[in-house]
Image (cartoon, rainbow, N blue to C red):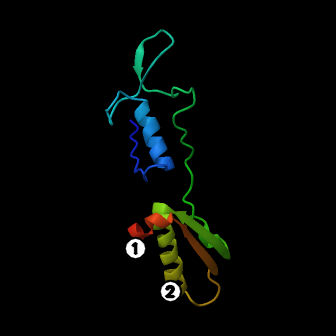
Amino acid sequence: TFTVHIQTQGKGSWTKAVYDYMLSLGPARQPIFKFTSRDDTGVLTDGRVNGPDGQQLFLIDGPHSAPTQHMSEYDHVFVCGAGIGLTPVASCVQSVVFHRWLFSIGKCYPSHAHFAWVVSYRDVKAYRW
């Protein structure tokens, strides 16, 4: 079972385009539906691999390690998060600051850490703490 939850970011956004495309694959006015397809013999089966344009519906690539898993192996690091990806970036900041305060004697890795968070200006108010 594969469930997709999409929070659309409004008219003209790529998330709205994905939402509209997914809705176009199912019965009219039904936001929840099961993908089906016909096999080579014409029998209706559960699941679908390709969309109406012949392109693969989903491509899930992975598994990948945590993006900051090896952060402590480098002298300088740059960590970038986007949108709700602020959570792991904030966790990295907390880890680096705590580690530096706890072990402030001698060399500490990373010795320099730069953090960036990318978000649409219209969404900034939603992330105010």
Q: Position of residue 39 (x, y in %)?
A: 48, 15
Q: Earlier in the sequence, mark 1 or mark 2?
A: 2
Relative depth, front residue between 104 and 84: 84
Tell me if I can see residue 110 in this picture.
no
32 or 42: nearer the eye? 32
Label placed on residue 128: 1
The amino acid marked with disc number 1 is Arg
Write the residue at 49% across / 82% down.
98
Where is mark 2, residue-wise?
102
Of all residues shown, which one is farthest toward the top? 41
Residue at point 57%, 30% (across, down): 55
Please, what secondary structure does the residue beneath circle 2 have?
helix
Q: Are marks 1 and 2 in contact (CB under 8 Å)?
A: no
- Counting from the top left corner in percent of width and height, residue 14 is at 51, 48
Q: Amino acid at mark 2?
A: Leu
- Cα separation, mark 1 vs mark 2, equals 28 Å
Quadrant where the C terminus is found in the figure: bottom left
In the displayed structure, 10 sits above or below 69; it is above
Percent across and percent down for residue 106 are 63, 89
Q: Is residue 53 visible?
A: yes
